[in-house]
């Protein structure tokens, strides 16, 4: 039986090239994703006003005769009024500082009460730097709280406690006085403790997802690199087999020639 010398054990050499390209791309993408997620941040300041609590002090669910709750010598129940205590957080959630030049110099900066009135001066209750923010409240009247235009670094914050009187059917709403450079608008975000916990959980989930994504890309890159090395070994093995195969074919040809010569000699001797 004749042996086909054209038999090619390296029928496909495309996959090693593809695996090499994929391994390089995988490593580049993994490195890029890691750097972008952890080190590259577009400079941006973001001042946020978060209403952490907004709690009414009076909750009368039944009509109780002769019940009086007075404020400034007035029974607020007769006027269908209520008193609420709100805690508002002002925080820079961006990655760059808010400087004094970022405030609009022509407009006061602070908080405006929409459907309620102050009944007591606002209090500064919690800050990221007590000595720095101690003079953050400039002044206040029934509807406006004017704040000092201070530098607020990333992550810095302060909390204000606000006492208001309003219609018993309303919930106090707030608005922002002033403008911050680089922010189209500054909104009041109505949060509560459960929502804050939820936001923290979402942030933790995002961090975990990022870590798993980086790990997955790294594992895939290593797997592709391993496949590339395996294919290199296979190629080397095929090269050796091809060489041995050629040697076998040559030996087979030599054997055929020897057999033919022996046949010729045999025929001559017989004649």
Image: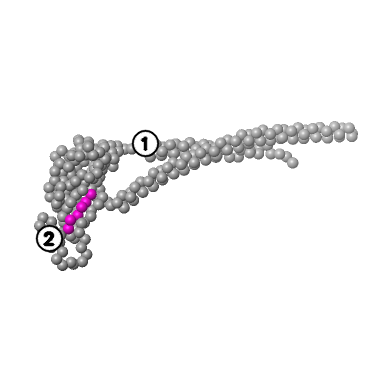
Query: Is residue 254 left or right of 95 when viewed as pictured?
Result: right
Picture coordinates of residue 116, whole percent (x, y): 16, 54
Between disc 2 and disc 1, the foreground one is 2
Q: Main secondary structure of the magenta part?
A: strand
Q: Which mark is residue 75?
A: 2
Secondary element at tag 1: loop
Name the quarter where the N terminus is drawn.
Answer: top right
Query: Is residue 119 left or right of 94 when viewed as pictured?
Result: left
| Residue drawn at (63%, 35%) of the image | 237
Magenta region: which residues? 82-87
Query: Is residue 264 left or right of 45 when viewed as pictured?
Result: right
Secondary element at tag 2: strand
In the rendered image, which residue does mark 1 sit on?
39
| Residue drawn at (49%, 41%) of the image | 219
Residue 76 in magenta? Answer: no
Within 10 Å of the Cα at label 2, are there few (<14), some (14-19), or many (20+) other Cα atoms?
A: some
């Amino acid at each position: 039986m004749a042996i086909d010398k054209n038999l090619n054990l390296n029928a496909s050499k495309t996959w090693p090239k593809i695996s090499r390209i994929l391994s390089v791309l995988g490593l580049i993408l993994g490195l890029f994703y890691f750097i972008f997620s952890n080190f590259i941040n577009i400079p941006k300041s973001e001042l946020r006003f978060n209403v952490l609590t907004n709690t009414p002090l009076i909750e009368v669910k039944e009509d109780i005769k002769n019940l009086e709750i007075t404020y400034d010598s007035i029974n607020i129940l007769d006027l269908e009024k209520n008193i609420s205590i709100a805690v508002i957080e002002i925080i820079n959630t961006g990655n760059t500082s808010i400087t004094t030049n970022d405030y609009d110099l022509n407009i006061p900066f602070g908080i405006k009460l929409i459907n309620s009135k102050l009944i007591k001066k606002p209090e500064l209750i919690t800050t990221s730097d007590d000595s720095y923010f101690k003079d953050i409240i400039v002044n206040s009247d029934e509807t406006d709280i004017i704040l000092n235009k201070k530098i607020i670094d990333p992550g810095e914050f302060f909390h204000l406690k606000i006492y208001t009187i309003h219609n018993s059917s309303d919930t106090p709403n707030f608005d922002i006085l002033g403008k911050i450079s680089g922010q189209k608008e500054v909104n009041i975000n109505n949060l509560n403790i459960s929502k804050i916990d939820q936001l923290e959980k979402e942030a933790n989930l995002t961090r975990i997802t990022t870590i798993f994504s980086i790990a997955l890309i790294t594992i895939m890159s290593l797997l592709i690199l391993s496949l590339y090395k395996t294919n290199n070994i296979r190629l080397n093995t095929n090269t050796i087999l091809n060489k041995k195969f050629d040697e076998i074919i040559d030996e087979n040809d030599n054997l055929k020639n020897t057999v033919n010569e022996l046949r010729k000699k045999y025929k001559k001797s017989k004649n």
